[in-house]
Amino acid sequence: MRVNVTVNGSQEAVDDVWEGESLLYVLRERMGLPGSKNACEQGECGSCTVYLDGTPVCSCLVAAGQVEGREVRTVEGLATAGRRDAAGDTAGRAAAGHDELDPVQQAFLEAGAVQCGFCTPGLIVQSHDLIERNPEPSDAEIREALAGNLCRCTGYEKILDAVRLAAKRKASAE
Amino acid sequence: MEFLRPVTWADALAAKAGQPDALPIQGGTDVMVEINFDVHRPPALLDLNPVRELAEVETLPDGTLRVGAGVPYVRLINELGDRLPGLAQASRTVGSPQIRNRGTVGGNLGAASPAGDSHPPLLASDAVIEAESSARGTRLIPAVDFYKGVKRNALEPDELIRAIRIAPASGPQYFSKIGTRNAMVIAVCSFAIALHPDERRVGTGVGSAAPTPRRATAAEEFLSAELDWDARGPLSVSVAQRFGELVKEAAAPIDDVRGTADYRKHALSVMARRTLTWAWNDHRATREEAS
Ligand SMILES: Cc1cc2nc3c(=O)[nH]c(=O)nc-3n(C[C@H](O)[C@H](O)[C@H](O)COP(=O)(O)OP(=O)(O)OC[C@H]3O[C@@H](n4cnc5c(N)ncnc54)[C@H](O)[C@@H]3O)c2cc1C
Ligand code: FES
Ligand code: FES
């Protein structure tokens, strides 16, 4: 079937989609957006987290057909230069300097919250949403917000540092 | 596989009647796991996301809330926590934020897992499931009659769940769940209590401790008769203990990877005592505020 969906601001028509496949599969395998990671395909790890109409969801648990006519924003859509232009070109990413990363991405880099990086895209989308909704999250609120994102490398401390840093920067920028 | 996308409730019912083996999908948090792992390959998926009615919450003329089957847990927590505290507490323990953003009570009822977290509070507050088919119209099924076996419910093949009908809390409600973490946990066992002071009655729900979620009827009757509804005196230790024992006797758990039957029974008696104590203390505190 064909699925019409807006991804990172650009309208796409994706063909030959199998009715039972997930949004995650469509993004990675049919649209060339490998930022969202596939680790468990059962909602347990959060590494496939994307925004669906502004709400973070596990893209592995959304059926492709369910996004018809809706808006998806992936980790690729957070950094300014990572946005796809009208021609669907993602090459701009390579030229992106640090300045163009989203503040949450920047904070993850600076805080050393990235080791193998597999969990990072999901954590960044989920943290991005947390800070949007709650600009001054307490530690308990950060932990609860990130409870569905697993990381096997960092031990989470640096991830918490990164979220605190991003929240602090956002607060002082406003 | 086919993918059906009805846009109205009437079309959804017509689609289900025309193709009873089409599998409804709402949040997909149960359905997609099974498809991703090839446990189940239905001939068709029936997407309920576009059906606006399912995302609505209304108050019926008698004050009962009619909560659309497609209202996700995050909205139950944020919008209905004051009126449905037991269900909101249970919702808050479901999976993770991402799962609560998508998962619904309608889906929990459709899946009918004995461990589903919405079931104990639905039982404790006498919720009614509103099912509908295009051939026979609306059918109101009390929660207590809805669960038919492990992952089996009372729906007919041509029926869909339209809403859950549930009265706003008339007294304190609590939900408690045993698991290894505060998130991402399938209940080892769970318990819900609801005090209905205007009827001098207590409701209960026991989860993950029998083939279906169930009420602890003998425990409810015992407690309803024993509680000091008028003077709201302190809870007697022996009453709380006996209540815990009766809840434990209502359970018929098994040993499995998450816990043994013995542990489940013990934990249920502890949760029953604890939630009763919290609820009764709240009830007493409202009297003190009023006086
Ligand atoms: C990582 C993870 C963690 C989880 N943690 C918990 C937990 O802590 N507690 C818990 O209880 N559950 C948990 N679940 C299970 C699941 O999230 C819940 O059962 C949820 O309520 C399902 O809702 P849904 O809308 O996603 O259902 P779906 O997956 O869309 O559907 C589930 C079932 O209900 C049927 N259905 C859906 N809507 C209707 C309708 N309107 N009429 C008729 N049938 C319908 C579907 O056909 C299907 O059989 C978890 C799942 C995952 C993946
Ligand atoms: S891949 Fe989706 S949650 Fe793990
Ligand atoms: S950095 Fe490796 S899983 Fe998180």
Image: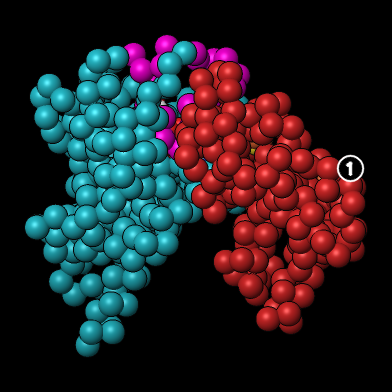
Chain colours: A red, B cyan
Which residues fall within the magenta stretch?
Answer: B21-44
Q: Nearer the viewer, residue B105 or B50?
A: B50
Relative to B238, residue A88 above or below: above
Q: Residue furthest bottom?
A: B291
Cβ of mark 1 under 8 A from ligand 3 = yes
In magenta stretch: residue A57 = no
Work out whether residue B84 can be spotted: yes
Q: What element does badge 1 sit on? A: loop
Residue plotted at (28% across, 77% down): B286
| Total tally of numbered discs in the picture | 1
Tell whether B151 sits left or right of A165: left
**How far from the left and from the top, in percent, is residue A3?**
52, 29
Quadrant of the rendered image containing residue B86? bottom left
Q: Nearer the viewer, residue A50 or B234?
A: A50
- State which chain disc 1 sits on: A
**How far from the left and from the top, in percent, is residue A160?**
77, 62
In magenta stretch: residue B25 = yes
Residue plotted at (49% across, 29% down): A65
Tell whether A116 sits left or right of B276: right
Q: Nearer the viewer, residue A65 or A59?
A: A65
Relative to A119, residue A55 above or below: below
Tell whether B84 sits left or right of B265: left
Residue plotted at (35% across, 70% down): B281
Residue plotted at (87% across, 54% down): A96
Q: Which residue is mark 1?
A: A116
For the residue marked with disc 1, what is the amino acid?
Cys
Tell whether B225 sits left or right of B264: left
Q: Residues within 10 Å of mark 1 (few under 14, many from 20)?
A: few
**How far from the left and from the top, in percent, is residue B66?**
22, 50
Q: Residue furthest front?
A: A87
Q: Quadrant of ligand 2?
A: top right
Work out whether residue A61 can be spotted: no
